[in-house]
Image: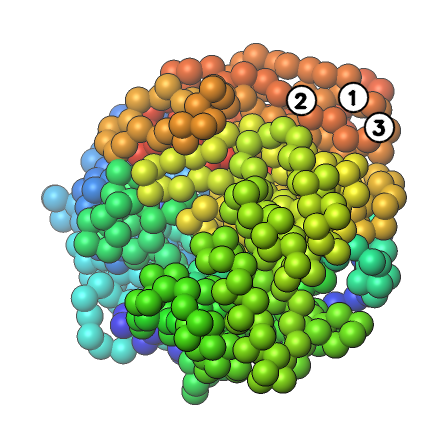
Amino acid sequence: MISRLYTVALAALILTPLAFAAGHPVCATPAYTVEELPIDKFDDYSAGALPPAPWHRLKGDAPGVSFKLSPDAESPFVGNTVTGKGLTMLVSAPGKGAGDGLERTFTPAPPGGEFLAFDFKLLPADNGAKPVDLVCELVDADAKGLVVTIGAEGVRAQSAKGYVRLGDVASGQWQHLAARISSDRKVSLALTRFGSKSTPLIMNDIELPNSKDFDTIRFKNGDEAGRQGGWSMDNVLMAGQVDASRAAWWPFNQIPIEKLRATEKKVFAYYFPIYTAGPDSEDPSLSWYSRTIKNPATLPSYNADRAGSGTEFEYCPLPYPPMDKLAERHAEWVRAHEHEVRLARQMGIDGFYVDIESFPSSTGGTYFNEQAISVMEAAQMVDPAFKIILAIYGPDGVAGGATDEKAVQFANADIVKQALSQPNLYRLADGRIVITSYYPEAYPASWWQKALAALEKNGIKAAFVPQFNSLTHLTEFSSISYGMANWGPRTPGHFDWVSRVKGLTTKCIFPIVEQDIRTRGPMYFESEGSALLRGLWENAIADGADWAYINTWSDYTEQAMAPSRAIGFAPFDMDAYYTQWFKTGSKPEIKRDVLYYFYRIHHSSAPAARGAVWTMPPWVQNRDPYNWIEVVGFLKKPGTLRIDVDGKTYEKEAPAGITSFKAPVPPGRTFVPVFSLERGGKTVVSRPGQYAVLDKVEFRNLLCHSGVISPDAAR
């Protein structure tokens, strides 16, 4: 309830829908991204130390100054009582600690507004000395931007007309500060005290000093010497316009979207509705994802089978700034999904497969379907040519099973009728509506034939494209299938799907997966960095598949490729490149150098303080865990790829085109890899990864993290 109260007032600006162009030519403007914006709860790091890079200490160690992560500094706003930590700074010696703190730099966010939030608590000096101020700076290279000072004089923000005061700060009490910064550099601040039932303090439309793009955030002591005491800080989150154009980051020039859609080959992404990835009217730093999904303290009651992993899932959507609260929740959902549709559209795909439950048996099932309908409505609002293929679950778990009666009920289900009435469903030239279903072999093909006949009796002629989870029922389904899909492999290697279904169906639909990691168990499949994703695309192209489907866009419990925390835009951007290659049959010419990196945040042998050991399924246990750091260079000309790993350098001469290069992860070390491209004896780009590789962890995390580096963005 706390977050709803103040973000309604905070979100003074509706996120402006981005206009979309017909294709993406070479972009002359600087490259921006939300991928590097800081999102850090500090919980994965070791207590007693400072956060590792990309955080950096502003000054060196000094007597009388203590700077460390501590469980005692865990903010109650999220309340992670298992692994929670916050950063505490204490000054016990007068004259020490002035201007000291932490900072990190990042590629600036896209135009369109930004959001910053963090939790803090002031710690008074024991001897009554004037307390230390906490200063937060979100600034450009000239140190201009948002500067907020928190101390005995309250919360003060530096404006173009001098300091403005938001309100008092009580020492020893946790508070939450949120800032919504508009594209015209006006900021709205909201201050909430933990446990307070009063209306949060709000100040709108503070005009910031003239500034360029924000690329640095700092949390530091005030510059006044002689002060004592300190502060604790936790749960830093920045957000920006996730669905901004990616054109400047792509190594190729995308042809117009209309031409991509006109090709005979189609590409759809599988949308799992329960994990939405658009903006919300709530503060994203206090969202459901932060308070439950990413909080191990809630798992025993919320989802006990994930407790051994410490999280419901390892990654989740990149946050947007909060949008205006609308009168109806459904209208909010539609507006949020519009951002996702714009994002998916620019990838060049034809549309979404959207899940619905034909027999929702719980409140969760109803919510699932409500979200699904809002996705369809959002697609119609943004671009009616962005098509929807209904992915309708059968009567799994419903009493009576796959009976003739259930087949009729399937066709007559209210949600099925509602979904089939949507105007932007994908139809074939003969008017048939394409529908699909996951794991259709759970019921005999004869049951599906009856269900399709019942649909036709209702006036719906459907073309069925089942998504098999096995290879043993293809012939049985041949007579009722317009196309055949398979949920696909989860480890690298040739997938012989096209030859299996040739002659059995009209369209061969090929699966595209990046990685599969499941916190239930916990269990993972070894994707070997980018090898699985690139291999499946090249497999589909070489074997002549008719369609491809990306599974999935948003099923975070297994695999998702929407731009997300920990994986960034690397899978998304690669999917855009390969989508054009697949649809046109021509490998896109590489016009710009781009590096994609992939690595885990600890060696597989790193000790963990708690939790279960991750295992692979028995049928893939002949693979060793992937302890490599990979860079994939999309190079317009030959060059030297380099990876610096904990003081050791690995190099590879790479031709023009696509080259994957790997370096080993040393066990027992904490470091951040640095990725470089050199050409003609000069460094084209050199940039660290966003994630520290840790020597020890709280819970194991086998997710392969990733990111994108562009010379144009290394500013």
Assess disc 2: are there few (<14), some (14-19) or many (≥20) residues with their C-alpha within 10 Å of its C-alpha: some
- Check disc 3 and report its element: helix, strand or loop: loop
Q: Is residue 372 above or below residue 147?
A: below
Tag 1's secondary structure?
Answer: strand
Q: Residue at x 64, y 14 (%)?
A: 650
Residue type at numbered disc 2: Phe
241 or 460, nearer to the observer: 460
At label 3, which amino acid type do we have? Ala
**Percent x, y of residue 127:** 12, 44
| Residue 708 percent location from the top left of the image | 64, 40
**Which quadrant of the figure contains the C terminus?**
top right
Residue farthest along the left direction in this orientation: 127
- For disc 2, the marked residue is 661
Q: Are marks 2 and 1 in contact (CB under 8 Å)?
A: yes
Figure label count: 3
State which quadrant residue 687 falls in. top right
Q: Is residue 372 left or right of residue 170?
A: right
The residue that disc 1 covers is 654
Q: Position of residue 302 (x, y in %)?
A: 24, 55
Which numbered marker is on residue 656? 3
Q: Residue at x 48, y 68 (%)?
A: 356
Measured Cα–Cα span from mark 2 to mark 1: 9 Å
Q: Where does residue 493 sit, x and y in percent of width and height?
A: 63, 28
> Which label's residue is closer to the chain start, 3 or 2?
3
Q: Disc 1 residue type?
A: Ala
Label 3: how many Cα within 10 Å (few below 14, some 14–19, many 20+): some
Dot 2 or dot 1, earlier in sequence:
1
Q: Name above or below for residue 234 compared with residue 411.
A: above
Q: Which element is circle 2 on?
A: strand
Q: Estimate how packed mark 1 is, as few (under 14), some (14 to 19) or many (20 or more) residues with alpha carbons within 10 Å.
A: some
Considering the image in quadrants, where does the N terminus appear?
Answer: bottom left
Q: Nearer the viewer, residue 234 or 363?
A: 363
